[in-house]
Amino acid sequence: MSSSEQREPTVEEIIAGVTSYYRGERELYVRHSEPLDAALRAAIARYFPAQLLDKVKTITLSGARIPPPPFYAQGKEMSGGKFPDFVHLASITYIDVLVFHDEIAPRTLFRALVHTRKWRCWDSNATSTCTYAPSRSIAPVCLFPWKR
C-alpha cells in the first residue's frame, strides 16, 4: 500500500471509536444531569426495571444542540447518506445519560430508555437476556429489555 492510499478501518476500530465518543460525551453531560423526574418515571415505570430507572440521568439542553460526532462524515458515507443528524434528533443516549434537545416527552423518554438498555447489555456482557454475535466484536441485540 502506498502512502497516498488510506487503509479502511476495521469493524473493531469503528466500534472502539464510537464507544470512546459515547463514553466521553457521557462524562461531559453527567456533571450537569439530574435523576429522572418523578412524574416521568411514574409514566414509564411499568416498562423498565427500577434498577435502570434509578441509574439514568437526564439533561435538557436550553438553546443548544448536540453537534455532529467526529465520525459523522464517515457514518454518513458508510450508510449511503442515512446516518442520523444529531442536531435534529429529539434526544441522544450517552450510555445512561439521556440528553434531550427540548422538553422530555414520554414517547421520547421511552425510546431513550430502550437505547440505555441496549448500552447496558453491551457493556455488561450479560448472557441471559443479550445475544451476541459469535465473534463478540459486534454489538449485541437485547431480546427482552424489560426482563432482567
Image (tube, rainbow, N blue to C red):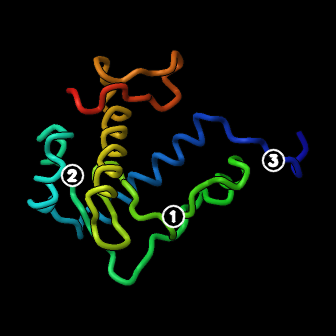
Q: Residues within 10 Å of mark 1 (few under 14, many from 20)?
A: some
Q: Residue at x 31, y 65 (%)?
A: 29
Q: Residue at x 89, y 52 (%)?
A: 4
Residue under label 2, please give it: 56
Image: 128 above or below 33: above
Q: Which badge, 3 or 2, comes first in the chain's sequence?
A: 3
Q: Nearer the viewer, residue 63 or 103?
A: 103
Residue under label 3, please give it: 6
Q: Quadrant of the C terminus?
A: top left
Would residue 128 be found to the left or right of residue 78 on screen?
Answer: left
Q: Nearer the viewer, mark 1 or mark 3?
A: 1
Q: As shown in the figure, which amino acid type bears the numbered disc 3?
A: Gln
Identify the element where label 3 is drawn: loop
Q: Residue at x 45, y 70 (%)?
A: 66
Q: Nearer the viewer, residue 108 or 12?
A: 108
Q: What percent of the width, then of the height, locates residue 35?
A: 14, 60
Q: As shown in the figure, which amino acid type bears the numbered disc 2?
A: Val
Q: Residue at x 20, y 40 (%)?
A: 48
Would residue 1 be found to the left or right of residue 105 on screen?
Answer: right
Q: As shown in the figure, which amino acid type bears the numbered disc 1?
A: Phe
Q: CA distance from mark 3 to mark 2?
A: 40 Å
- Quarter where residue 36 is shown: bottom left
Q: Residues within 10 Å of mark 2 (few under 14, many from 20)?
A: some
Would residue 117 be found to the left or right of residue 20 on screen?
Answer: left
Q: What percent of the width, then of the height, locates residue 124?
A: 30, 31
- Quarter where residue 65 is shown: bottom left
Q: What percent of the width, then of the height, locates residue 92?
A: 40, 58
Image: 65 above or below 78: below
